[in-house]
Amino acid sequence: MKFLDMFKIKRSAIIAKSISPEESLIHAADLVISEIKKLSTRYHTAETEVYTLEKKLRDEKRRHYDKENVLKRLIEKDDPSIKDKARLVILLAKVIKRLEEEISAKRAMMQQLVEAGKQLKAQQESLADRLEYVREMNRAKALGINTEADVKEAVGITTVTVDDILMRIETFSGKNATGDEIESIDVEDYLNSLK
């Protein structure tokens, strides 16, 4: 078992050293896009479920209304089966309440999916910006301008999965994948100067 773990560690180290910052960003973008697709699929599934539940709710309300009217007529006639009919009407009312709760829960989940999708979309846009930055740095390097520290700085990514990738790069290559060459205060000062 230890030999297998050692092999996995060595293999991960070799792979991590061979991955460029641009490849890491592309991989991270693929992961984010995949998650966005999963959220979209789940949203549409929930939407279909809500539609189905709403149809069932309308049917149950109609049944409840009909049974309640029958019960009212039986009460006027002082029919002995009133209690049994009343139990059925109460059961239908509970089913209606449960369906309404289920629809409400599904709609709340759909709202959470929308919010998560917005966050992932923002991460996707951030990754696209970082990827463009890395590509420009590579282009500048091809022109003879050494910007390796800037390229490494651009790899700082916010998702847990992507952070894991970066941690592997840092762990196995012994280099700081995020870098501190451009401080956030520098970015803020620059943005303020543009205003």
Image (cartoon, grey):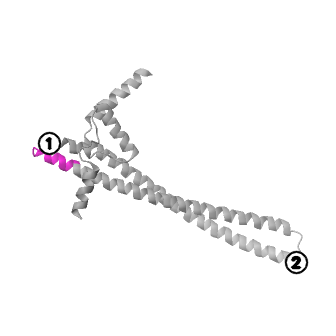
Callout 1: few (<14), some (14-19), or many (20+) C-alpha neighbours within 10 Å?
Answer: few
Marks 2/1 in contact by CB < 8 Å: the verdict is no
Q: Which residue is mark 2?
A: 77
Camera-side residue of 17 and 158: 158
Residue 144, picture quadrant: top left
Indicate left or right for 145 with 66 as reference: left
Magenta stretch, main secondary structure class: helix
Q: Residue at x 25, y 60 (%)?
A: 192
Spot occupied by residue 173 in the image (x, y as percentages of width and height):
28, 32
Of helix, strand and loop, which one carries label 1?
A: loop
Q: Nearer the viewer, residue 74 or 177?
A: 177
For the magenta stretch, what is the residue range?
A: 134-146
**Can you give x and y, in whole percent of width and height, for residue 36 in the image?**
40, 54
Is residue 140 found inside the magenta-colored segment of the image? yes
Q: Which mark is residue 18?
A: none
Of callouts 2 and 1, which one flags the residue occurring earlier in the amino acid sequence?
A: 2
Q: Nearer the viewer, mark 2 or mark 1?
A: 1
Q: Quadrant of the C terminus?
A: bottom left
Reply above or below: 186 against 86.
above
Residue at image mark 1:
146
- Which quadrant would the N terminus be assigned to in this image? top left
Which amino acid lies under the numbered mark 1 shown in the image of this protein? Asn
Q: Amino acid at mark 2?
A: Lys
